[in-house]
Amino acid sequence: MTEVSWNLLTRLGEAQILLPAMLATLLWLSLRSHTPRAALVWGGCTAVSALVTTANKVAFFGWEMGYAPLNFTGISGHSMFAAAVLPVLVRVLVADAGPRLQRAAVLGGTALAALIAVSRVQVLAHSPSEALLGFILGLGTALLALRGMHVPRVHASRLLVYGVLAWMTLTVSDAPPSQTHSMVMRLSVALSGRDEPYTRWQMLRDYRHELQREGRPLPGYFTGPLVMGRMRVVE
């Protein structure tokens, strides 16, 4: 895939794109079913995972709680949201289909979420450990939601299906840059009382100095593109 393709794909994991599509589907699910249980289970599971992801990032930016051996600074929110939302979203949109198509929809949503997680590494936004953990957390959320919710066998209106598809297609290229990351950093600074948020490059600088003092080799990721492009910051 080209760099442009990865950049477009990675935007599908943004909360500002996924959450409106999810909320529209939750609203439809609540109105068309006899009980809001399905919507509450999916929304609740996703909210908990979003809280865990945010708390993890705040812990790093505000209190330096990362793990340098794996170049880990926090769970990838894009990977988490993609894996938590997409498999369930497409499953709900084919609620009146047969079991085989429903399973295929879940697998397709999961595969797309996995590609979004890979894209976070490709665009140098996250390390592999961060993208993988985000995907695992999100997929666990989706599976828990699918297990705990009863999706009513009702026909998804064309307006909902086409509206969700149009929203996600158009916003990938036209939506303004997401401000979620900067908001979390500001929150971290406010809660911790730091002057500035802790950074990946400070963590790697300190870890490298520690390894050099002990005469141990640097991990392989120090020669990878996520670090090599910004080595002057690590010095």
Image (spheres, grey):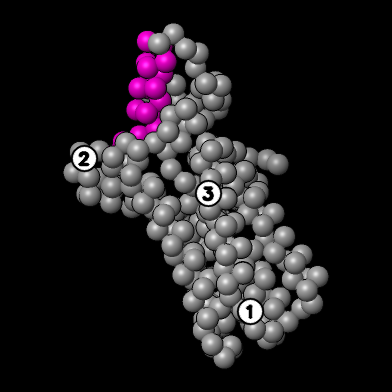
- Picture residue at 37% right of the left edge, 17% below the top: 210
User: Which element is circle 2 on?
Assistant: loop
- Picture quarter containing residue 165? bottom right
Q: Is residue 73 visible?
A: yes
The residue identified by callout 2 is: 194
User: Which of disc 3 and disc 1 is earlier in sequence?
Assistant: 3
Q: Which residues are magenta?
A: 197-213
Q: Which mark is residue 41?
A: none
Within 10 Å of disc 2 (Cα), the crowding (few <14, some 14-19, many 20+) is few
Q: Amino acid at mark 1?
A: Val
Disc 3 from disc 2: Cα separation: 26 Å
Do the numbered discs 3 and 2 sit on residues whose CB atoms are within 8 Å? no
User: Which element is circle 3 on?
Assistant: helix
User: Which of disc 2 and disc 3 is earlier in sequence?
Assistant: 3
- Picture residue at 76% right of the left edge, 65% below the top: 104
- Picture residue at 20% right of the left edge, 38% below the top: 195
Specify whether residue 209 is painted magenta.
yes
Do the numbered discs 1 and 3 sit on residues whose CB atoms are within 8 Å? no
Q: Position of residue 13 (x, y in %)?
A: 55, 55
Q: Position of residue 223 (x, y in %)?
A: 54, 20
User: Which of disc 1 and disc 2 is earlier in sequence?
Assistant: 1
User: Which element is circle 1 on?
Assistant: loop
Left/right placement of residue 54 relative to residue 101 reads left
Q: Position of residue 161 (x, y in %)?
A: 65, 76
The residue identified by callout 1 is: 151
Q: Position of residue 118 (x, y in %)?
A: 62, 43
Specify whether residue 104 is painted magenta.
no
Left/right placement of residue 162 relative to residue 211 reads right
Q: Quadrant of the N terminus?
A: top right
The residue identified by callout 3 is: 134
Q: Quadrant of the C terminus?
A: top left
Disc 2 from disc 1: Cα separation: 46 Å
